[in-house]
Amino acid sequence: MSDLFQKRDGLLTTLASYGRVAVAFSGGVDSAVVARAAFEACGNDAVAVTAVSFSLATGELEEARKLAALIGIRHTFIETLEFQNDNYLANPSNRCYFCKTELYSQLETRLDELGVDVICNGANVDDQSDYRPGMTAATEHKVRSPLIETGLTKADVRALAKHWSLPCWDKPAMPCLSSRIAYGVSVTSERVHRIDAAEQFLRREFGLREFRVRLEANDLARIEVSLNEIAPLLRLPSFEVISRELRSLGFRSVTIDLEGFRSGNLNLLVPLETL
């Protein structure tokens, strides 16, 4: 625990050194810990900024609002326009680069309005081992990553969130809905809404926590569920209910991935030279 407290203190010191700071705040555990630390270190010189777009899952906006209020940090929203960018809609393997470029560009133009000098994100040390094209955008826009700078892993972040009694401390990762669409299959507002509706249905019907509905070519829905939650889905009545509901949403066929949920699974198809 003493090591965690040392990292906590290091995080506070790092954020205090930034001066006035804007936190890119999704409401997930990483950005929540950064927002909590920024508020403690910088007070009203810190602001949490949540991006609003078609790719935000149902309920995430309200959860971010409640979490920011609990932390006490100033909170604002900006509408991002990545769905107007043809490069983003084409859904190449670096799609996230265009999304983060849009977010950070908008934040840069609002520095005076927000009363801040520095933009920071919630990237942690473990993110450096995955394919994260959004980090290229962060570098280009001089966005700081205080969790990385302080050496916090995902486990550290969750432990610190629990220490600070943040209700999201054990919340599963919730990346944007566009991340469910296989690279090369174009991103559309209709597709992300369809994925959102499918995931809301599975969450409501089966009480799932850690899962994804992936959209593959030819409107195939591939359901990935954590293996410790998959059993209720592998029954004939469930097959019928799931197939009927997802087909009604516009999917042509439905599969359940027997390897279970794997975060960043679509990145396995990215050529190694890209990583």
Image (cartoon, rainbow, N blue to C red):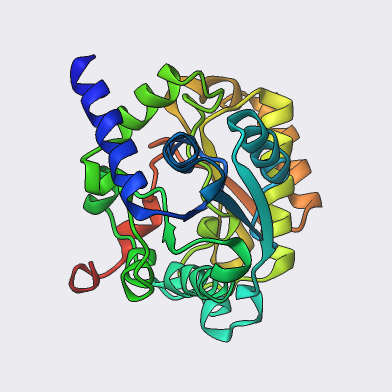
Q: Is residue 39 left or right of residue 15?
A: right
**Percent coordinates x, y for residue 209 in the rendering:** 56, 28
**Percent coordinates x, y for residue 164 in the rendering:** 46, 21
Identify the residue shown where x is 38% and y is 41%. 262
In the image, residue 91 sits, relative to residue 223, either above or below, namely below
Q: Is residue 165 left or right of residue 266?
A: right
In the image, residue 267 sits, relative to residue 41, either above or below, namely below
Regarding residue 25, the answer to whether it shows in the image is no
Identify the residue shown where x is 57% and y is 73%. 106
**Picture quadrant where residue 201 is located:** top right
- Which of 175/163 is in front? 163
**Picture quadrant where residue 244 is located:** top right
**Percent coordinates x, y for residue 63 in the rendering:** 67, 36
Identify the residue shown where x is 40% and y is 54%. 19
In the image, residue 215 sits, relative to residue 40, either above or below, namely below
**Percent coordinates x, y for residue 149 in the rendering:** 23, 48
Q: Is residue 171 left or right of residue 152?
A: right
Work out which quarter of the rendered image holds the N terminus and state it.
Answer: top left
Regarding residue 148, the answer to whether it shows in the image is yes
Identify the residue shown where x is 41% and y is 17%. 163
Work out which quarter of the rendered image holds the C terminus and state it.
Answer: bottom left
In the image, residue 98 sits, relative to residue 180, either above or below, namely below
Which residue reaches farthest right?
A: 248
- Which of 257/199 is in front? 199
